[in-house]
Amino acid sequence: MEKKVRIEGVITRMLEMPTLKESVLIEGLPGVGNVGKLAAEHLIDEIKAKKFAEIYSDSFPPQVFINPEGTVRLVKNELYYHRGKKRDLVILTGDYQGLTSVGQYHLVNTVLDLAEKLGTKMIYTLGGYGIGREIRHPRITGAATDIELVEELKKFGVVFKDEPSGGIVGASGLLLGMGKLRGMKGVCLMGETSGYMVDPNSAREVIKVLSQSLGLEISLSELESKAKEIDKISKKIRHIEKAMDEKKPDDLRYIG
């Protein structure tokens, strides 16, 4: 089965329409530290989720990616599904978020329309919480549509701000807000990250909490390997920066 639907500048290419029961929607799109995207892609790989839809939008950057063999493809978002023992999952990830506010709303409503058809009652959005400095043991901060969810996630160590501060920009926030209007409950899990580079360390902590909340058993070894690689790169950068800071002004020579 393949079907294409175009609504408000969004083209949805359906590869399959799975039959699911009270599915949980999990979003992990590019953002701060790419934490959400890393977490979602890791989950897809570990549970061997199956792709069932591709989403194209005129609010994505006007470009194509070049594949290793030299062919090209449009940038896109993708939806995967997994039938679990306890619950079915729908996972959203992709190359970009929408570049405009209108584009974001159209994309989110497209996803929520599909989620409703798949019986979604609960949404988890995943992302990074930039703190502007390196951190070895990132905490998970959260926000939720219902106070009951706040209390439940506190049991897993999720930190909720005592006072409102700022907001959640992009799909991670919009899916919760628009989903709530449709009667869906939702939670946003944000891993602390410097925001300077891709952060698999933070993504690992997000997956830990998500796994606990959903009762999943997910291996974290791949993310741990990636975290070690990023740590090596960070150490090299720090070493170079330190050497540059220690370089004395009179070491510089000018002849002319």
Image: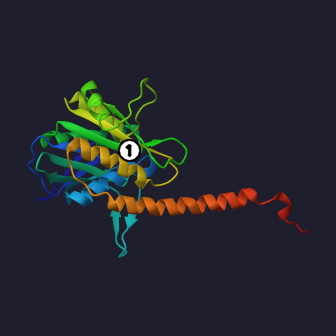
Q: Horizontal and vertical percent for residue 209?
A: 30, 44
Residue 4 in the figure: left or right of residue 28: left
* Residue at position x 45%, y 50% in the image: 33
Q: Is residue 112 above or below residue 134?
A: above
Quadrant in which the N terminus appears: bottom left
For this rendering, which residue is in front, 160 or 182?
Answer: 160
For this rendering, which residue is in front, 122 or 171?
Answer: 122
Residue 234 in the figure: left or right of residue 210: right
Q: Horizontal and vertical percent for residue 63?
A: 41, 59
* Residue at position x 81%, y 59% in the image: 248
* Residue at position x 34%, y 72% in the image: 71
Residue 112 in view here: yes
For this rendering, which residue is in front, 109 or 129?
Answer: 129
The image's colouring method is rainbow
Q: Secondary structure at mark 1?
A: strand
**Residue 245 in which image quadrant:** bottom right
Q: Horizontal and vertical percent for residue 86?
A: 12, 46
**Residue 133 in which image quadrant:** top right
Crowdedness near tag 1: few (<14), some (14–19) or many (≥20) residues, C-alpha within 10 Å:
many
Residue at the bottom extreme?
69
Quadrant in which the C terminus appears: bottom right
Residue kind at label 1, given as amino acid type: Gly
Residue at the right extreme?
256
Residue 9 in view here: no
Q: Which residue is mark 1?
A: 127
Q: Horizontal and vertical percent for residue 67?
A: 36, 70
